[in-house]
Image (cartoon, rainbow, N blue to C red):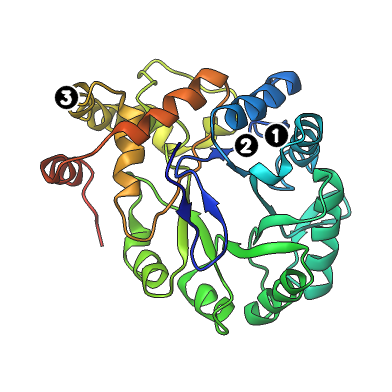
Amino acid sequence: MTNKVQLGKSELYVNPIGFGANSVGGHNLYPHMEEITGKELVRTAIDHGINFIDTAFSYGKGRSEQLIGQVLEDIGKRNQVILATKGSHRKEGNDYVMDNSPSFLKQTVEESLQRLRTDYIDLFYIHKPDESTPKSEAVGALKELKDAGKIRAIGVSNFSMEQLKEANADGYVDVIQDHYNLLDRSAEKDLLPYATDHQISFVPFYPFAAGLLAGKYKKETTFHDYRSSMPHLQGEQLEQNLEKVEELRDIANAHNTEIANIVLAWYLRKDAIDAVIPGAKKPDQLLHNLKTLDVTLSEADIKTIDQIFPYHQ
């Protein structure tokens, strides 16, 4: 059985390889993804020991939560899963605005509980900051929900360093989820050290930089979803990035594994990073991600990866 790791100061213990479930019901992100495939992904993850599933209201405007809730109810293994979701999107007219007010956070948690068909959420994140709510007040509302047994751990996502400090004024934050990968290591400047110093787990999103770092793309690859607007996946930038990714192949071959597993193993060597949540659109991708647990990078491997993808302060 996989050795589970603790998320921050919480009582949550997870497989270090989780599942970022934005493809499950996330029709706004992956318009051609079938819901039946999404549900199969959740089942496959749980069947193979992936117990950390990460979703959000904004993935399909609640549809991802609904599908995951259906699967958990069908298979009856809710207590074996660490379920993370995120909220802060409040509908205003035909659009959504960010709202971190205590009243809205409490409302959105109740709505997520209904969609997920559960009476508690293991980890609830404020998905994005708003401009007006004091962050310690927002987190204070989540602490009340935690005390009431509605959530088990408190997270924030997309918060700046200053916002994180304010949110964690009372030491209540267990997890921060933010942008971090080999192409963008800027979180190493302050977010990762702060997380380490305050026993907060840092969960990187876009760990594969929207698939690029998984080693599957070619310079001819074209995108017909949200990835089509990402500069690092277009033209000359794509070609340069692919050359760097290709340099990881020697390390992958030496470990008899795939580039994706080398990348994930590198993240897990960081003090603040206890778990990663790579996405998947096919069940076999989940199983490939799990092979990361068989990889032990040497100091020479780490040094080589650092040279290929240097940290620019």
Amino acid on which disc 1 is placed: Gly
100 relative to 44, above or below:
below
Amino acid on which disc 3 is placed: Ala
Whether residue 9 sits left or right of residue 269 in the image: it is: right
Assign a secondary structure to mark 3.
helix
| Percent x, y of residue 250 | 17, 24
- Quadrant housing residue 75: top right
Q: Which of the two marks, 3 or 1, is nearer to us in this view?
A: 3
| Percent x, y of residue 176 | 52, 62
Q: Residue furthest bottom?
A: 170
For the residues labelled 3 and 1, the Cα–Cα distance comes to 36 Å
For mark 3, what is the residue?
Answer: 254
For the residues labelled 3 and 2, the Cα–Cα distance comes to 30 Å
Asked if residue 120 shows in the view, the reply is: yes
Circles 3, 2 touching at the beta carbon (< 8 Å) = no
Amino acid on which disc 2 is placed: Ala
For the point 54% across and 74% down, the residue is 163
For mark 2, what is the residue?
Answer: 21
| Percent x, y of residue 186 | 35, 58
Q: Residue furthest left?
A: 300
For mark 1, what is the residue?
Answer: 26
